[in-house]
Image (cartoon, grey):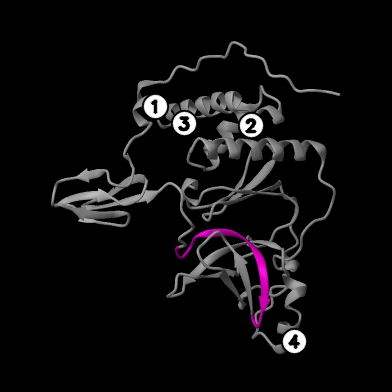
Amino acid sequence: MAADMRLPTFRKQVTLSPSLSALDGKDLVVPGDVITSDTGFMRGHGTYMDEEKLTASVAGEVERVNKLICVRPLRTRFNGEVGDVVVGRITEVQQKRWKLETNSRLDSVLLLSSVNLPGGELRRRSAEDELTMRDYLQEGDLISAEVQSVFSDGALSLHTRSLKYGKLGQGVLVQLSPSLIKRQKTHFHNLPCGASIILGNNGFVWLYPAPGQQDEEAGGYYTSLEPVSLSDREVISRLRNCLLALGAHKVLLYDTSVLYCYESSLPHQIKDILKPEVMEEIVMVTRQKLVEQEG
């Protein structure tokens, strides 16, 4: 019977630049830490006043906007804002709406009137459309969508009225902390390594083979069921392990950091990336590249 034995070996030392070592642990606080005793600052989320000192109530990173100080938690549920890109899974089909799990405190809502009809028709939704809702989306389907509005109780209302949103086909879902996703102008990226990625603001990341020609007549519901080549599956598997490595070491996720991590992992086999010592080395090299790029 085959056994996987791991023996201690000499590890390549990665020298940290002074700027990188200064970045680690910057402005991180735990509950009870005094952020400032200056009374000129305003109290934001995650803080409270204790004997005229601004104190952290959650563990996270201190953010300052002019005179406002808040603490962004390292581990939290997704608090959606209008315009956020999310990846979610259909949990329930109800009257004129779908319920979705989007890693937030409450289930999100996708109204029948907020989706594109197949063929891109623009018309009022009829009773016939309501009866065929499961032909569009059913329980268990994964979709990408955008936050249209936030209800008074904090639940999110979504829409998929653009052709870049809609039902997701073949790929891999990676669930990470929403606080690790960097907000950008676009969260849809075609990576040079031959795969595409959707970085959902809610911490759900979708990896899939680079798309070919998309049929616009499908209105976002067509999903290709063609077999995925071995090379594409290997690229997606490597990216998935890189995302888990970056998430474990609390590195901010965006297209550049994912690509640098992918390049740093190429000397190693895919299955070895999640070994603690290899993971640490890959993430250290990635951080070094990011600091050099920011410059």
Q: Which residue is mark 3?
A: 290
Q: How many neighbours does mark 4 have within 10 angstroms: few (below 14), some (14-19), or many (20 or more)? A: few
Q: Main secondary structure of the magenta part?
A: strand
Q: Residue at x 32, y 47 (%)?
A: 31
Please state, as top left, top right, bottom left or bottom right, where the N terminus lies in the image: top right
- Mark 1 sits on what residue? 20
Amino acid found under the numbered disc labelled 1: Leu
Disc 3 to disc 4: CB gap under 8 Å: no
For marks 3 and 2, give the CA distance: 21 Å
Residue for badge 2: 274
The reply to whether the magenta stretch includes residue 121 is: no
Say which of marks 2 and 4 sits in front: 2
- Foreground mark, 1 or 2, reads 2
Q: Give the image quarter of residue 23.
A: top left
Q: Earlier in the sequence, mark 1 or mark 3?
A: 1
Inter-mark Cα distance, 1 to 4 = 59 Å
Question: How many labels, in total?
Answer: 4
Q: State the residue at coordinates (53%, 56%).
A: 202
